[in-house]
C-alpha cells in the first residue's frame, strides 16, 4: 500500500545527523522492506523549542495551508496513486502534527502515529497549543505505535496502542564484529592508542541539557576510576563541545580521545573494535547508539532512563544503573573493567538479541501486521 510519511520535528532527509532522523529513515526502510510504497508527504518543521506562542501560531497557520495544498494534490491524482494511510513519526508538544489529522480525514484514510508522547503538565503555559494539537491528533489515530515503552502509560486508549521494538539493519554491524581484531589493530595504529587497554566508547551529540549532563556524569565516574587502565573514545560534536572538553579536563589528556563526528558508515567498525559502550543516558528515550553498539557485539553500561531497559538486558547484554547515580555507574564500570570474560559473554548475547528482536526484518513484519490490522488490507 502507499504510505504518506511525515516527521514534524525534522524531515527524514534533513542533512544534520541525529538519532531522530535515523529512526525516521529506518521506519521508512522497514515499510519498504515490507513491500509498501513510502513518500515524504511534507518537510514542514513544526518544532518550537523556545516556547514562543506567536511562532507556534504562525506554524499552525502554515500547517493549515500545507494540509489544504496536500489535499488538493492528492485529490487530483488517480485513486491508485493516493495514499492508503498517513504515518507521522515523533509528535509531541514541541513538535505537533498540524497536517496528518486534516489530510487523513479529508481523504478518508487511517492516521497512524509513531512515537507520540503526551505531557499533561504542558496543557497550560508556553506550549499549550502544541499540547492540545497533540491531544487532538491522537484522538484521530487509528493506531499509535510505541517505540518507547515508557510512553505507553501516558497514551490515550490502550486498545489502539501497538508496541514496536526499536530496530536497525544489523548487517553492517555484524560484518564489523566479524573483523573485530583486524579493525581494532588498524584503528589503534591510526589513532595512536594502545590496543591492550580496555577501550570505552561514548557516542552522542554535544548539546546543552541532558547530553551535556551525561557527559559530565561520565567524566565524574571516570575520575573516580583514574587508577584503572582504560582509554575513552568520544564520538560526537556540537555546540556544547567546549563544555564537554572542560568536563574531562581533569583527566589525563592521553586517555581521552575526541574523535569528532564520524560518518555513520564507519561507526560499526568503531563499535566492534571497542570493549564497552558507556553512557549515563540522562532522560534518554532509548538511545540508538546503545542499540547500534549491541548490534556490533559491544556490551553497554548505561543509566536506566526512559525505555533503555527495553533494549539493554541488564546482566545479559549490558548493565544498567539508576539514572543520575554517578557512584553506582562508577562501581558498575569498575566491575566490568575487571571482568573481560563477562564482557565477552555479554557481547555474544548482544549480537544474538539484536538479530532476534531488533532487526529491520523483524520490524518490517511487525509494521506490516499493524497496517493490515488497521486498514483491513495487505
Image (tube, grey):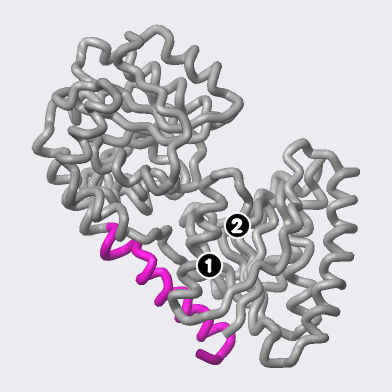
Q: Residues within 10 Å of mark 2 (few under 14, many from 20)?
A: many
Q: Which residue is mark 1?
A: 28
- How many numbered circles does the render carry? 2
**Which comes sooner in the sequence, label 2 or label 1?**
2
Secondary structure of the residue carrying numbered label 1: helix
Q: Is residue 332 visible?
A: no
Say what secondary structure mark 2 lies in: loop
Q: Residue at x 81, y 41 (%)?
A: 125
What's the mark number on residue 101?
Answer: none
The location of residue 190, given as percent across then percent down, is 28, 27
Residue drawn at point x = 77 percent, y = 36 percent: 50
**Would residue 58 appear left or right of 144 to someone viewing this image?**
right
From which residue to which does the magenta span run?
354-378
Q: CA distance from mark 2 to mark 1?
A: 9 Å
Q: Are marks 2 and 1 in contact (CB under 8 Å)?
A: yes
Identify the residue shown where x is 41% and y is 62%: 165
Res 189 quadrant in image: top left
Q: Nearer the viewer, residue 172 or 100?
A: 172
Amino acid at each position: 500500500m502507499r504510505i504518506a510519511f511525515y516527521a514534524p520535528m525534522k524531515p527524514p532527509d534533513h542533512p544534520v545527523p541525529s538519532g531522530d532522523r535515523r529512526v525516521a529513515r529506518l521506519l521508512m526502510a522497514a515499510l519498504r522492506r515490507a513491500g509498501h510504497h513510502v513518500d515524504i508527504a511534507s518537510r514542514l518543521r513544526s518544532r518550537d523549542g523556545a516556547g514562543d506562542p506567536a511562532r507556534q501560531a504562525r506554524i499552525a497557520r502554515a500547517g493549515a495551508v500545507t494540509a489544504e495544498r496536500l489535499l488538493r494534490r492528492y485529490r487530483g491524482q488517480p485513486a491508485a496513486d493516493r495514499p492508503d494511510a498517513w504515518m507521522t513519526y515523533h509528535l509531541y508538544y514541541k513538535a505537533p502534527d498540524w497536517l496528518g489529522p486534516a489530510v487523513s480525514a479529508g481523504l478518508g484514510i487511517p492516521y497512524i502515529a509513531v512515537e507520540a508522547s503526551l505531557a499533561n503538565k504542558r496543557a497550560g503555559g508556553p506550549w499549550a497549543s502544541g499540547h492540545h494539537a497533540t491531544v487532538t491528533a491522537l484522538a484521530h489515530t487509528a493506531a499509535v505505535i510505541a517505540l518507547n515503552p515508557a510512553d505507553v502509560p501516558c497514551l490515550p486508549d490502550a486498545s489502539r496502542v501497538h508496541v514496536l521494538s526499536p530496530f536497525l539493519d544489523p548487517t553492517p554491524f555484524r560484518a564489523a564484529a566479524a573483523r573485530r581484531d583486524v579493525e581494532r589493530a588498524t584503528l589503534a595504529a591510526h589513532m595512536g592508542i594502545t590496543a591492550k587497554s580496555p577501550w570505552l566508547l561514548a557516542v552522542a551529540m554535544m548539546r546543552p541539557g541532558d547530553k551535556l549532563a551525561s557527559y559530565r556524569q561520565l567524566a565524574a565516574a571516570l575520575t573516580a576510576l583514574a587508577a584503572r587502565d582504560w582509554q575513552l573514545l568520544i564520538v560526537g560534536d556540537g555546540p556544547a563541545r567546549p563544555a564537554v572538553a572542560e568536563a574531562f579536563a581533569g583527566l589525563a589528556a592521553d586517555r581521552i580521545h575526541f574523535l569528532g563526528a564520524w560518518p555513520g558508515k564507519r561507526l560499526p567498525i568503531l563499535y566492534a573494535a571497542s570493549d564497552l559502550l558507556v553512557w549515563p543516558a540522562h532522560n534518554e528515550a532509548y538511545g540508538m547508539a546503545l542499540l547500534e553498539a549491541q548490534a556490533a557485539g559491544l556490551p553497554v553500561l548505561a543509566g536506566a532512563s526512559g525505555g533503555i531497559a527495553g533494549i539493554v538486558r541488564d546482566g545479559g547484554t549490558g548493565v544498567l544503573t539508576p539514572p543520575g547515580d554517578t557512584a553506582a555507574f562508577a562501581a558498575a564500570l569498575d566491575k566490568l573493567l575487571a571482568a573481560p570474560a563477562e564482557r565477552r559473554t555479554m557481547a555474544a548475547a548482544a549480537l544474538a538479541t539484536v538479530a532476534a528482536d531488533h532487526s529491520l526484518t523483524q520490524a518490517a513484519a511487525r509494521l506490516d501486521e499493524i497496517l493490515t490490522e488497521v486498514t483491513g488490507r495487505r
